[in-house]
Image (cartoon, rainbow, N blue to C red):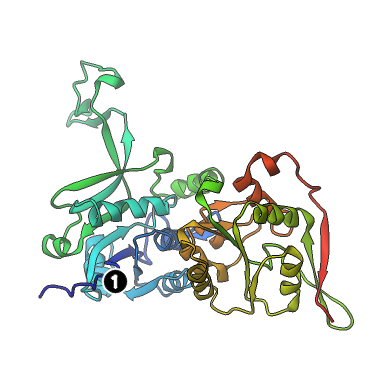
Amino acid sequence: MMPPTASPSTPPKVLAVIPARGGSKGVPAKNLASVAGVPLVVRAVLACRGARLVTDVVVSTDDPAIAAAARSAGADVVVRPAGISGDTATSEAAVLHTLDAHPDARVVLLVQCTSPFLTREDVESVAAAVLEDGAETAVTVAPFHGFLWREDELGGGQGMGHDKSFRPRRQDRPQDFLETGAAYAMDAEGFRTHRHRFFGRTALVRTDPARVLEIDEPHDLQRARALAPVLDRLPTPTRDDVDAVVLDFDGTQTDDKVLIDSEGRELVAVHRGDGLGIAALRRAGLKLLVLSTEQNPVVAARARKLKIPVLHGIDRKDVALKQWCEDEGVDPQRVLYAGNDVNDLPCFALAGWPVAVGSAHDSVRAAARAVTRTPGGEGAIREIAAWLLGPELTHTPPPRHAPQTQHTPA
C-alpha cells in the first residue's frame, strides 16, 4: 500500500533517524560521551532539529539514559527491540524499524552520533538532494587527496587505485571523495524496497574536510574534545541576513543572577553597552522584541527604558515568537533570536539565526548558529549589534563592566 500523500499545504515529511545503541565496545557509553559539554546523541539531535527541511527527529535506542537525553533535546524516541540491538545489528535495520511508524515519510535520513561536528547545513543539504534535487540517495563526503595502500599476502604495500610506479601530481589526478559517515538521505519508498542506504542516483554532498571525524576509539573522543573550541565557532550574521532581533532577558541581558532586598523586591544588573546596541539596532530599522518566560515586572520596566516591545510571562516562547512573526510580517528565517538556556531551544529551531550568549548552557551553544564571545549581562547584545551594524559599533566598545541596576517597581 502506498503511503498517504501530504496535502499541498502540508510540507512533505522528512524523517531524521539517529541510531544510538547503549552498547559500544570501542568507547563505552559512547553515544552519551560529551564533546564541549554536550552528549554526542544531543549534538546529533540538535543538528537535525535545526535543519530547515527536517520535520521529525527520532532517536532509535535500547538505552533509557540515551532516550532521556534525546527527549531532553527535543527528539522523539523509538525503543529498539533486542533483535536489532546487538553488535551485528545494522543501522539500516534501525531506520527500517523506525520508518514503520512513519508510513507517510517522503524522505528518511540516517544521521550518526559518531560525527560530532555535523552541522545543520549538512543535514539540510542531504535532505534537499533527495527532496528537491531529484536524487534517490545522498551522502556527506569530503574532498580527499591521499594515496591509499593495502598490504598484500607477503606483507608488501600495493597501491589502491594507483600504480605505485607512477606518482601523478595532485592537479593531474581525478578528485576523490571520502565518505564522512555523518549523514545519509534516502527516498523513503526506495529505501523500503532496497533496504540499504545506496540505490539509484547517489548525490555527493560536499562538507568541510576539517570537520570530518568519526568517534570509534577513545583517542577519537580526545581529538574531538580538543578540536571543539575551534570547530564549534560559527560565522556571524550581517545586516543583510536579519530583519528582526528577538531577545531573551534573564541570562541574556543579565548575568542570570538576582538580588532580593528585605522587602522581597528583585533587582538585576544590566549592561549599558547592551542599551547602546539596542538603540543602534532600533535606529537601523530592525524590528525588536524582548521575549521572556519571567513574569517579574523588571522585564517590562527594562523594555520600556529601551523603547522596544515586550512579551513576558510566556510559557511557550516558540508559539509566541511564531505569532509575533506573523503579526509583524517577518519571515522567521530572517529573525535573530538570542538566548542562553534550554527553554530557548524551541525558538532556536524556529529562528533562522539562533544565537547563544557566551555564558549559555552547553546544549544551547551546540544548537546555536553563532555564539558571542561575551557572556550574558556583560555586553553580549552589544556584540550582536556590532555583527549586524559593523564599524558603526565595532570601534567604540563600552567599558566591559558597566552595569546598570534595574529593579522591580514597588
Q: Is 155 in front, or is 119? A: 119
Look at mark 1 in the image and give the residue it sits on.
9
**Quarter of the image holding residue 397?**
top right
Disc 1 marks which amino acid? Ser
Q: Position of residue 315 (x, y in %)?
A: 57, 80
Which quarter of the rendered picture does the N terminus lie within? bottom left
Q: Residue 399: give x, y in percent of width and height.
A: 81, 47
Q: Position of residue 229 (x, y in %)?
A: 56, 46
Say above or below: 18 vs 26: below
Q: Tell me: residue 59, above or below residue 139.
A: below
What residue do we see at 12% from left, 60% from top?
194
Q: Is residue 100 visible?
A: yes
Q: Is residue 135 left or right of residue 224?
A: left
Q: For residue 65, what is the image quadrant?
A: bottom left
> Label 1 neighbourhood size at 10 Å, few (<14), some (14-19), many (20+)?
few
- In this rendered view, identify the residue nearer to me: 186 or 159: 186
Compare residues 125 and 242 and report the one nearer the observer: 242
Quadrant position of residue 344: bottom right
| Rendering coords of residue 216 (x, y %) | 38, 50
Q: In what element is the residue under mark 1? A: loop
Looking at this view, name the residue that lies furthest to the right: 262
Residue lying furthest bottom: 263
Task: Judge whether 213 appears above or below 378 on screen.
Answer: above
Q: Quadrant of the C terminus?
A: bottom right
Q: How many marks?
A: 1
Q: Could one spot residue 339 in this view of the protein? A: no
